[in-house]
Amino acid sequence: MQTRETDLKYFYELIRELLRVSGGYCRLSSASGRDNWPERGLYFFFEGGERRRGSGTGDRVVRVGTHALTAGSRATLWNRLSQHRGSFTSRGGNHRGSIFRLLVGKALIKRERLSCPTWGTLGGSAPKDVRAVELSMEQRVSAEIGAMPMLCLGVDDAPGPGSDRGRIEQGSIALLSEFGKPALDPASPKWLGHDCDRLKVRQSGLWNNRHVDETYDPTFLDVMAHWVKKQGGKR
């Protein structure tokens, strides 16, 4: 009988195979655009201390993402990852261009009782003097995200909301999310996300705000399996 638990187990079997064919995790703290990134694909972040419980053993995925879901988009996987990583030289970044950075920053500010009144304000851009004041906070976020183990799955299909990348992203997030469901792989009591101001982050156990309250179509797992197998065939 197919259940969410069996689907989670299959998902993590695919993650285990992706880890094997990738040769291990990578980390954004030491990554650059010169690395051998797929042109298009998805990323899966993990986090120290976050382990599976109900679906088996091993590391728990804490964020899933992709890029170029607008038809005609030329954005690459590294374009998106570099926004999450931030600047290699200043070790800062721009949380207004990365929801991942924004959410992690919100949680750090609360947990560590930091002061950054402009964090998450001023829309998509901020004056130079504001960014200068925010630099130390951006550096703290870069360190947090940069330390997280990560895997990438190459999915080289055309940009668009109906792409395989879009299906895998939506399906993975909806499957992994604990939002409004009996918990199978809940976040640990010490997970940083508990201090985020977004209800969907806290209750889903993911650094995602979209798709966490949606249902999933289990056929996305077969699509994901196809691309994991294809990535393994390239080694």
Image (cartoon, rainbow, N blue to C red):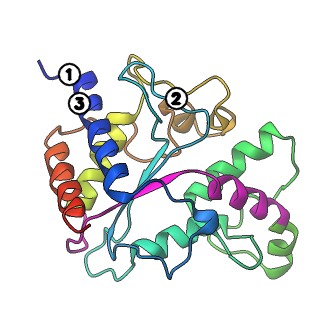
Give the spatial CA distance, label 1 vs label 2: 21 Å
Return the x and y of residue 116 as percentages of the image width and height.
84, 56
For disc 1, the marked residue is 3
Is residue 119 one of those drawn in magenta?
no
Return the x and y of residue 139 as percentages of the image width and height.
77, 63
Q: Is residue 165 left or right of residue 82?
A: left
**Mark 2: secondary structure:** helix
Q: Residue at x 44, y 24 (%)?
A: 185
For disc 2, the marked residue is 203
Is residue 139 one of those drawn in magenta?
yes
Evaluate whether residue 120 shows in this view.
no
**Three-letter amino acid code of the residue under disc 3:** Asp
- Looking at the rendering, the stretch of residues picked out in magenta corresponds to 136-163
**Three-letter amino acid code of the residue under disc 1:** Thr
Return the x and y of residue 215 as percentages of the image width and height.
26, 35
Mark 1 or mark 2, which has the lower sequence index? Answer: 1
Give the spatial CA distance, label 3 vs label 2: 20 Å
For disc 3, the marked residue is 7
Q: Is residue 29 left or right of residue 118?
A: left
- Quadrant for the N terminus, please: top left
